[in-house]
Amino acid sequence: MNTNSWESVIGLEIHVQLATFTKLFSSSPTVFGSEPNTQASEIDLGLPGVLPVLNKEAISFAIKFGCAIDAKISNQVVFARKNYFYPDLPKGYQISQLDDPIVGEGKVKILLGDEEKTIGITRAHLEEDAGKSIHDLFNESSAIDLNRAGTCLLEIVSEPDLRSANEAVEYLKKIHKIITFLGISDGNMSQGSMRCDANVSMRKFGDDKLGTRTELKNINSFKFVEKAINYEISRQIKELEKGNSIKQETRLYDSTKNTTRSMRSKEEANDYRYFPEPDLIPIRIPKDLVNEIKQNLPELPEALKKRFIDSYNLSDEDADLIIANKETASFFEGVLSHNVSAKSAINWITGGLFALMNKNDLSILDSKITPEHIAEIIKNTDNQKISGPSAKKLLELLWESGGNVEKIIIKEGLEQISNDNQVEKILDEVILENQKQFSQLKEGKDRLQGFFVGQVMKKTSGSASPQVVNKLLKEKLSK
Amino acid sequence: MTELVKLSLSEQLEGLKTKSFSSKELTEAFLKEIKSKSSLNTFISVYEEEALKNSSIADKNISNNRTRILEGIPIAHKDIFCIENKKTTCGSKMLENFISPYSSEVYSRLNNLGAITLGKTNMDEFAMGSSNETSYFGKVFNPIDKKYSPGGSSGGSAAAVRANQCSFATGTDTGGSIRQPASFCGVTGIKPTYGRVSRWGMIAFASSLDQGGILAKNAKDAALALHCISGFDEKDSTSLNEPVGDYINEINSKEEHVLGIPKILIDKISNNSVKENFNNAIEILKEDGVKIEEIDLPHIEYSLPAYYVIAPAECSANLARYDGIRFGHRSEHASSLEELYFNSRTEGFGKEVKNRIFIGTFCLSAGYFDAFYKKALRIRRLIKSDFDKAFKKVSSIAMPTCANTSFELGSISSPVEMYEQDVYTIPANLAGLPAISIPSGIHNKMPLGIQFLGSYLDEGKILNLANKFQNLTDFHEYE
């Protein structure tokens, strides 16, 4: 099989759940994980006689995204009905946008190694989400939870500009970063706040014409996007190499088997019978609103990275670590606001804090450690009030239960003993207990110096100043 | 006490105020009429006990001088308006046992103004029909002669008003469903400007055309009742945020009228008695000083085909929610999801409703959308602009309400012939304009009606004109 002669062409449709306080067309709350059907009003249930009222917050969230990808924003919001039957689609149609989506053509840049690549975005439009069908809760019957029905989605459709699963993942990560930095979505893929379908087709290198595509559904993590696309690419190549043609169809990704299987063919595809939603008259988007949103747009990842590198002299790698997400970036700036060096801040965040976060599988927001804590650890280390090992211990204590840094230092006796008399007393004890080693050291066995420092540290639980121990030891040797 | 029911709304209000009779007596009198003429089949539900209880409360309010605008006035609602904890059937087997958990805005407003709800009136299934023969709860009989149809779809309301079973009744008008039955029963019916009355809780047939309104004994009663249900409602995005006119005073004010007559349309009327009656009515107004002006509405002849694309298209989506999953009729003979959908809808919907769902689904289908739906929307825009032009010259437009007097029940079996019933009423719905039908004469014992169309939000003008006509004639008076 000659896989090298085939080029894969991929486009993504990403559904982003917008973090609006209420649903797109009703005032029901949108908290994830509530008891089934407790966040569904008569509107979400599609009862006879109910009418939708558009949530204005969703409009400004969509405009924010449009501004962030440098897209043309429509001058109106106009909805259409997309008709299909499904038990968790209460009205038998989804209110979506067809013509004139709120966000028009835009673009994002992704980094592939050192190379930058621009990915075109065709459109992004607002629509309501469906509910959830649950098939494994009851014997012989399915259950429906309409808590999610009607929540705001922004569907972001890319151009077929992606050429590998890796590019698709980078693009997805970029979108994830943009929406979380904008604060328009929590981007939580495991809770379904960001879901993705991929259109995959193959063609011979050098061909302009696109091959027949399949649409992969249900790929809801960065890992699965990569796996599903790679599986589909090799499946299509196998078929094409055998001389078969690709059928235009929708395929479902099975993450347990890591395969895709046919869900419905083009012929079986729904005719959605879109038509203008008569219950919602088009709403004008004032130019002023777009300008206002544009001016108040939060700093986006690229700009932030550049600023961090320029103003704090961070390395490229450190900057990437710190802007991995919005929370970490603002945590970092929070630490810096207490007048400590960027280098120390980076070290404590990416070294100490990240390790604790990874170990406990928690995000920076879930931790009890505040930027002020980190700043105080740095200050106390810098002025040698506490030793390095004590500082680590302090970080762990703060991770466990938070609290006041000064009080913990006192309570736990973490303060560095740099008083000569105190340290000398302990050193004398150690020498008395290890007379043999001390004479060997005197005779020139230099590596025993570390042994004595270590013994003093042990007796003081790490709170003696190593510098002071070394100084006193030298004095005693020269006597 | 049967004479009480023959009083007009304003006379009833006066009688209650002066304590000539009590609300309880009035309510009892209406309930007696409902019982004694139950063979007319005008009501689907009657709330006897509750109405009597509420009338006692109203009497207390009146004696305590806490009299609201409609305090103690017994009325009826078309069974398309949801009332909390009450069956709301929409004339369909599909909703035979549907108890609404919330109330429509029209009901709430009237209820809050002190009106007493006697019950819910019969109607064509989902408001689809022009004879009141499509109701799952049986046809309604015309109180003037039981051989005849009361018209539809608000036939129950029109017949109940005519039979003195309520002071006034609510109705809805998508293509003439208030005005045609008003004409057939010899009562007054007004459909206001689209968006004047909230559609919240009013079960949708064709959302861009549906509008709630009033059936009453005369224009003066209709003016007061309409005033009570009109006004902005934030729950309905198509509701107009414009002040409501003072119809009660406007009805008696001295107004200059320039009445437009669509000459070509009138000349084409084939039924001589209708044509003659119309011309006589215009003569009466002319003699009273109303200026008559010929106008041209060149696209009006395409109203019917445009309507019978747009209305079914919207209905096909609006009725998709009746799928047997969450509420409404659910087939007991289903072993798969497909079968549950298929059988529930087959069993729950009547023939006419199915006809329209099929037509609408077809018109929206891929390949037919442009030829049918889009073209119909273009015609709708042209008709609107015809009216815009006409209203630059005239203050109101007159047309017959119907092409004929009522027909015998069961005499029209062709759906198309039935659809032609709406030929004069549909244009007002397509253009979203207010229109009122009032009695204008009798032919072979059955009433004829004339219709006045007003410009955007000019309900006051057509009510004034209708009142003028009723002051000059006695066609609206009956025993």
Image: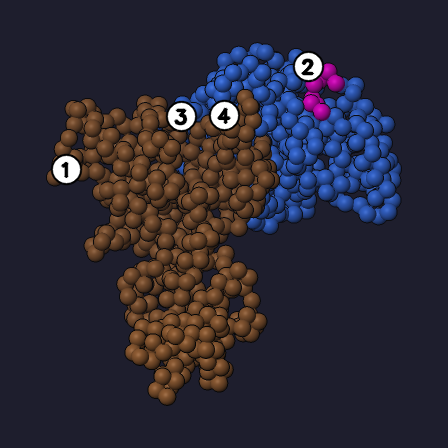
Chain colours: A brown, B blue
Question: Mark 4 sits on what residue?
Answer: B423
Q: Say if mark 1 contacts mark 3, CB within 8 Å.
A: no
Q: Give the distance between the C-alpha atoms of the residues marked 2 and 1, in whole angstroms.
A: 84 Å
Q: Earlier in the sequence, mark 2 or mark 4?
A: 2
Which is closer to the viewer, label 1 or label 3?
A: 1
The reply to whether dot 1 and dot 4 touch (C-beta < 8 Å) is: no
Kindly indicate the quadrant of the structure image that contains residue A452: bottom left
Q: Residues within 10 Å of mark 4 (few under 14, many from 20)?
A: many
Mark 1 belongs to chain: A
Residue at mark 2: B146
**A283 w.r.t. A260: above or below:** below
Q: Left or right of B323: which side holds A431?
A: left
**Chain part drawn in magenta:** B38-45
Q: Chain of mark 2?
A: B
Structural distance between the alpha carbons of marks 1 and 4: 68 Å
Are the residues tagged 2 and 4 within 8 Å (C-beta)? no
Q: State the residue position of label 1.
A: A4
Q: Residue at x 28, y 44 (%)?
A: A168
Could you give the CA–CA distance between mark 2 and mark 3, rounded to whole angstroms?
Answer: 38 Å
Q: Which residue is mark 3?
A: B363
Q: Residues within 10 Å of mark 1 (few under 14, many from 20)?
A: few
Between marks 4 and 3 in the image, the one whose residue lies nearer the viewer: 3
